[in-house]
Structure formats: structure tokens, C-alpha cells
Amino acid sequence: MTVKNQFEDAKKEYERWGINVEDVFDKLKNVPISVHCWQGDDVGGFEANKESLSGGIDVTGNYPGKATTPEELRQDIEKALSLIPGQHRVNLHAIYAETDGEVVERDQLEPKHFEKWVTWAKQHGLGLDFNPTLFSHKKSEDGLTLSHPDPQIRQFWIDHCIASRRIGEYFGRELGTPCLTNIWIPDGYKDVPSDRLTPRKRLKESLDEIFAAKVDEQLNIDAVESKLFGIGSEAFVVGSHEFYMNYASKNNKLCLLDTGHYHPTEMVSNKISAMLLFNEKLALHVSRPVRWDSDHVVTFDDELKEIALEIVRNDALDQVMIGLDFFDASINRVAAWTIGTRNMIKALLYGMLMPNEQLKELQEKGDFTRRLALIEEFKTYPFGAIWDYYCEVMDVPVKEQWLEDIEDYEKTVLTGRSEAIDSAV
């Protein structure tokens, strides 16, 4: 039976519940996912004065074929996007600036250092998002940046964030789609602090100064991102969820929820509806924590499906800006992008194919028996046939066929890079 025939049979099952699958496809293909560039080179970046990875971030594994130049990284992203249905975005960190070998300090970065990224994005119809990089730097080696007691160090990072917002504004202007510029800092203490308030006061003052710099809010959207703890900041993180949730609300900024930045028993899916009640927009970094914020490749697990369901059933596709954030050097990096992004889109499709209105009505009526029964039965509805056909009509490989493309790419491109590095050594 062909993919189309299987789809036609499956579609009838969903139509019984008033679900128009073609309408679902039209809606889904217009949902952009912001694909993070740093999966492709293990969060290394291309600074002329590159420092080792720090800030509580760790990338494990040494799979061959890591991108070592901007051109290689863009080539790898292109390959991944060719295997993923839909039109998406790419998320950059400041360390991916291209300075032609010149040492340019982060507080001096300008739009010109990202012109090649913009040219490339235009060629491929991509939007760009951005993040200042407040880690892997001599001025962050003691674990503090925007909350640092030294005013000179603090000012350096303030200026870097201001420069980053102006780069985001440039992206928005050039590409015709607003750039989400997100601030995350590693600041915290390894052991229990004797004063939690003062570092948070300094962080608030730093953010106030950063956001006082005028940029066009139609072109650049500001977001702030919290964390529960990190390596080297196990006991206290300055930018907690409560801090940023309140700061964002009071200052009309987006609160970004990273699914790995909470206690292992917390479900970010459960936070989405509460946040949407008080915010016009919300941003997500979707990751998969294992034991801690280890940023594993996103899988099609229960929490991912629940996140997608919360977005879909609350009609919030235009309110939630979805980005990804994982990095795994133990497997093929292009495959990691492909697996994780396809799973995010797959979860959204899963959510769109649930009888959400009927389930809401059952809950309001108190018919919890029927509600539970339907939720459980829909778990084995022929969702896979719908997903396969969506991939086919979007002209990307169906099922595991994309693996053949990745394996060929590894043989023809990635292996050659590893051999070139080995011979140079």
C-alpha cells in the first residue's frame, strides 16, 4: 500500500471527529521552528580568540565531522533543513560572528560581522534569531557576568548585550521577520550564598541599562531566560525563573522557558497556559534533560507531546515562539538536528490531530471517564500514516529514508573533514 493510500484510510479515522487533515497541514507548514546553530560545532563558535567552553555547559562525545568553519556549519544546516518539512529559522549565538581572523571583542560586535549569515538566510528564505554569548570568555571565568561585583566587567557584558540587540534589529530589518534576541547568563554560586539579594539587584540594574538602549521593537523582540542550576552554580543561580518571570512581566519582555532549566519533576508544559494568560507572547527552548540540564536530542516523548498539545489546544501557535536547544557530539550532528526538529514538528501535528474541542467539553461537563478513554484511544490512532504523507507532500524523506541521505552525506562530506583534521595534526 502506498503512503497516499495509507493516508487516505487514516484520514477517515480523524474525519469522524471533525478533524480536517488538509487544514491541519496548511496550518502546520506555517509554523517556524528556530533551529539552533550550535548543535553543529559543539557550541564552539568562530572567534579569533576562542576560549574553551565554560558557563556550566558541557558537550560530550567526539563524533567525526564537526563543522570547523562558518561555511561548513551553514552547509550542515542546509543539509538538515532539506530533510525537515516546513520553512524554518536559524538561531545564532554571538560567538558565530565572522571577523576574518581579526580579534573583535564581544562588546564591539556589529551587524557587519554577521553579513554572511544574513546573505545566506536571504538565499534560503530563513529568519534569524540571536543570543549574546555570556560564557566561554575570560570575563566570565569566575561564573558571574551581568551580576558581577566589578562594575567594569559588568559594563562589558551590558555593552555586549546592547550590541547583540542591535544585531538582532539588523536581522529583522534585512530579513523582513523580527529577530528574537534572548539573554541567558550563567551567573551563580557553587555553594550556598550569604547574600542572594545583592547579585539580583545588580542583574536587574544591568538589564535595565541594556533595555534602555533603543532598538526597533518591530524588528527585534527581547527575551530573558532562566535556569534552576548549573555546573559550578549548583546552590544558587541569580537569574531564576521567578526573577525573570517578574522582570519580563513588569518590563514588557518575553519570558523564555527552556525545558531543561527546571527541576526534573517540573513540567514546562504545565506552565504554558499560566504564562499565556498574562503574556501576549511566550518563547520556548525545547530540549531534553536527562538527570540535569544535559540538552539531549529532543525525542517524541510524553512531555514533548504535552508541550505541543498545550500550544495547539489553546490556539497559541502565533503566541509561542518555538526554538530548540540541544547539543550531542556522540552521534552524527546533522542527524541530531534532523531527529530533534522532525520530532518537534511531529508533536505539533500530533496535537493538531487530537479532538481538542470535544475533550474540553467533556472536562467542562465533568465526564472524566469519556475524556480519559478518548485520550488513551487516540494514542493508537493511525497518526504515523498522516505524518508520513505530510513529509511526502512537503517533499522530504518519509520515515527513516532520511537516514540514507545522512549516511551518504557523512561519507562524502563529514568523513573528509575528519581526515583533513587528522592529517593536519
Image (cartoon, grey):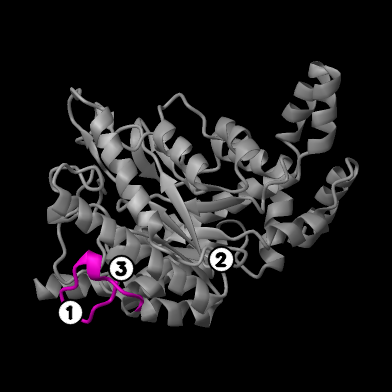
- The amino acid pointed to by label 2 is Gln
Q: Which residue is mark 2?
A: 218
Q: Name the element at disc 2.
A: loop
Q: Which residues are magenta?
A: 97-111
- The amino acid pointed to by label 3 is Tyr
* Magenta span main SS: loop
**Residue located 66% across and 62% down the image:** 391
**Residue located 53% across and 70% down the image:** 82
Image side of residue 322 versus residue 5, left or right: left
Q: Which residue is mark 1?
A: 101
Q: Position of residue 174 (x, y in %)?
A: 50, 78
Q: Residues within 10 Å of mark 3 (few under 14, many from 20)?
A: many
Q: Name the element at disc 3.
A: helix
Q: Residues within 10 Å of mark 1 (few under 14, many from 20)?
A: few
Assess whether residue 300 is covered by the magenta stretch. Answer: no
Q: Position of residue 294 (x, y in %)?
A: 33, 40
Q: Name the element at disc 1.
A: loop
Q: Which residue is mark 3?
A: 96
Check the picture and name the quadrant holding the C terminus.
bottom left
Residue 413: which quarter of the image? bottom left
